[in-house]
Amino acid sequence: MQSSYYSHVIRIVLGIVALAVLGFIGKTVLTPKSFGTYGYYRADAIEEEANIEIRHWTNAPCFSCHAYEANLHLNGTHKTISCEFCHGPYADHVTNSKKTGILPVKKGEDIKILCLRCHNKSIQARPEAVIKTVTMPEHLKDQKVKLTHTCNQCHHVHAPLKYINRAKQIIGMQGEN
Amino acid sequence: MNELHEGARFLIANYIFPNDLHVHWSMMIVLYPYLSGLVDGAFIVAALYYVFGIKSLKPIARFSLVFALAFMFCIALPLLLHLGRPERNINMMLTPSPSSAMAGFGYIYSIAMGLLVLIILFIYRPTLVGMVKKSKGYMRLFYRALTFDSTNLSPEALELDRKIIKFLVAIGIPVATVLHGYVGFIFGGVKANPTWSSPLMPVIFLFSACVSGIAGIVLAYIAIRTYRRSAIDVNCLKILIHTLSGFFILAFCFEMLEVFSHHYLKSGFHHMVEGLLNGPLYYSFWEWQVGFCSITSLFLLGWLTLFKTKDQVYIILSGVVSFLLLLQVLFMRWNVVIGGQLMSKSARGYTVFHPEWFDKEGIIAVIVVMAIPFFLLFVLSKIFPLWVEEEKQV
Amino acid sequence: MDNAKPTIDKERRVFIKKVLEGTIAGSLLLVLPMNAGGEKIPEQLAGIRDKEYDLTDHDFAFIVDITRCIGCGSCCVADKKEFAVPDGHYRTWVERYLKDFDGNVYVDSPNGGLDGYHNPRTDIDVNVRDTFFVPKLCNMCKEPPCVQVCPVGATFLTPDGFVLVDHKRCVGCAYCIQACPYSVRFLHPVTKTAQKCTWCYHRVRKGLLPACVNVCPTGARKFGDLKDKTSEVYKILQGPGVFSVLKSDMGTWPALYYKGARREVV
């Protein structure tokens, strides 16, 4: 049977139309529901992002159990420091009110490295008005202590001037330095 | 170039933003505009014959369409290899963002592909109808599908086909232009990158696409015909080389204009561009892209177009110049894509690109992706005879 | 815009309804951030917890005070741990600038400042004229180029002004990474989707400060709602201080302001 001279053209046009309709249906079905609610994106993604688990819980939950440290910390010059910076995030320690992990406590040389992260004078970019800095080992020499001393032998890590001020009170000196 | 821009002192820091160390768009994105450029250029050759009626291109008009199709099939391949989540590529079709330069790809590519397939099916309809009659079983079914189940080759059917072909190819020109010009705009639209953000970028990409496509056709034509020991139509070759010269002069002028304007305007991030071209890109840009590939090609093209040359020499030189230009365009893509990303957005330093061998965007993958179109061309040539006189033998 | 408002309100009501019915998992946590013991984390951002969250009624701003940054890298540490940021990628980082008397500027940021700055620069020998730290994070542009270029609408500007990434739709093309003038984006090596600083959107929605602001010991990072006239950021931005944004010529209109940023800061 000989087909008409334009039959293939009609089939092509019909094929294109069918493809377009199929494509349109597929696009409608597969596009996520909340897409376009606020703009050209999936609105549910906002809530998904908002629902991510919090890992840093601020100092308050720490203080609710560690009252002794809380008292020291809140009354010392380190009160602006976050517990979780030195010890790690709360989420690594407590899950559903249960202790699930032990957070590290820095000791020895690590303490020194940690302290000098902020207090190292040789990093000149630190504004003096913001932070007190020292040069090591000159500071140890000036204070007439052994060069092997770690920072926390004189400065309590939670309240750095606690012992210093106490000692000064005992020997009857007033004020700092 | 001893007098450096004042901004060049920025580079003393050699500071790269910590997230800028990695080059995110690597060799696959170099390959993508290269492949789409080849398609574009090959299509232009076909359009010259079918739309603008340049009769002397007849011997290669069909070939260039099949050549374009073989490469067209592979354009999406480097992109899929590049995507972090290739299985989600359908999102480009489902929710193409109207504000994004990249979002159009799915649709533009589909349209271009559909158009090219239709053009080829219409052109080869007489051949395919012949095959329907000859073949049996599954192959018959296959050829019936390709002919849209119509064996009508009456003069009025052929006349209708001829009109449709001319119409489709005419639409094909803007589509192919958009397909490639838009690739240029993907780069040109990134304002954060001082070498990319230029309205000249789509123009440069377009002209260099034509250059690479025509050069690819010339080289493939010479290579295949020489391999098969069949005659090469020097008259057709001459038209191709003349067209190639025109496009290359335009492409090269715009490439140099881009560099010159950067140099002359000396705007905010000029020091980064200057330092890039004279630093990390010195060899691949000045020596390879400009010096070796472009200047040599210009001299060769000048010789071929202006002076009388023996046919044998003409064929050899055409092959050489085409190869050089293919290399030129590849270097241009590399220098734009990889080069542009070497500049850290800190405006203070350059990162380094290390091509890997076995990565999914590595050198082996590049070789495989580049080999596939040639394999496809071979397969396609079994269905669509590349040369008119071969068909007469069939 | 006026026509769009009722639909937004309606959508929001529907959403809140869903939250109350518990059909959206985890949304309750959103409303009341408590641990199972019932201890609430004290509210850090006023006016978010006790009422229905209105996406359209907030205008958050982030202020980085360069004159107070000591380069301790607490912010970077907190950020890395809050989001388990993969090594070698940075949602926030701290740069060290150093300027000599010849006008040359030297910048470095070893490991993004994550390990802190323990040594002065030994690789250069110049007299220091000015030196300072610059923390970097997402600029939360009002005209975000990353959102513009995303081909699939997987990164977007929320009505409350956050630029976020939809990790379920991102195809990992990295166009947003190219488009960001501040290089705050990266491709997550495991999920292969784009990631960036979110100003801790999940914390903000629970009335908490972003993790980096929360840990900053010197108050160099400030965050708050400009629509809340009592907020710290409102008072700071209201004051006479000189503030700048990064790469203002890019036309991105950041909501991240810098106080004390020298002109060398890029």
Image: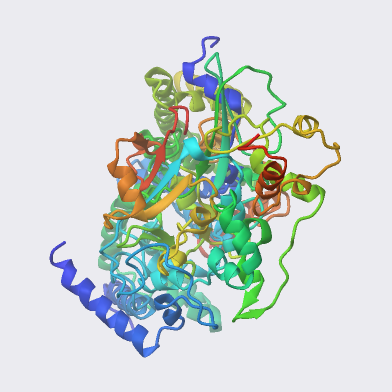
Viewer can see residue C143: no
Residue drawn at the location 44% of the way across and 46% of the way down: C180
Residue at position x 36%, y 51% in the image: C232
B274 versus B244 height, above or below: above
Q: Is residue A13 above or below residue C91?
A: below
Task: Report the label total.
Answer: 0
Q: Position of residue C6 (x, y in %)?
A: 16, 72
Q: Nearer the viewer, residue B367 or B8?
A: B8
Q: Nearer the viewer, residue C194 or B68?
A: C194
**Identity of the residue drawn at 37% across and 78% down:** A26
Is A27 situated above or below C115? Answer: below
Left or right: B346 in relation to C88: left
Q: Nearer the viewer, residue C258 or B332?
A: C258
Percent x, y of residue C189: 62, 59
The part of the image, by quadrant, that contains residue A30 is bottom left
Residue A5: in sight, yes or no?
A: yes
**Extreme-bottom residue of the structure:** C21
Residue B244 on image: x %, y % = 45, 33
Give the side of residue B251 with respect to residue B17, left or right: left
Residue located at (31% from left, 80% from top): C15
In the image, residue B188 above or below residue C186: above
Residue B287 picture location, percent across and down:
61, 23
Residue that lies at the very extreme toward the top in this rendered image: B2
Image side of residue C245 versus residue B214, left or right: left
Left or right relative to A100: residue A23: left
Kindly give the residue lying farthest to the front in the view shown.
A172
Identify the coloring. Answer: rainbow
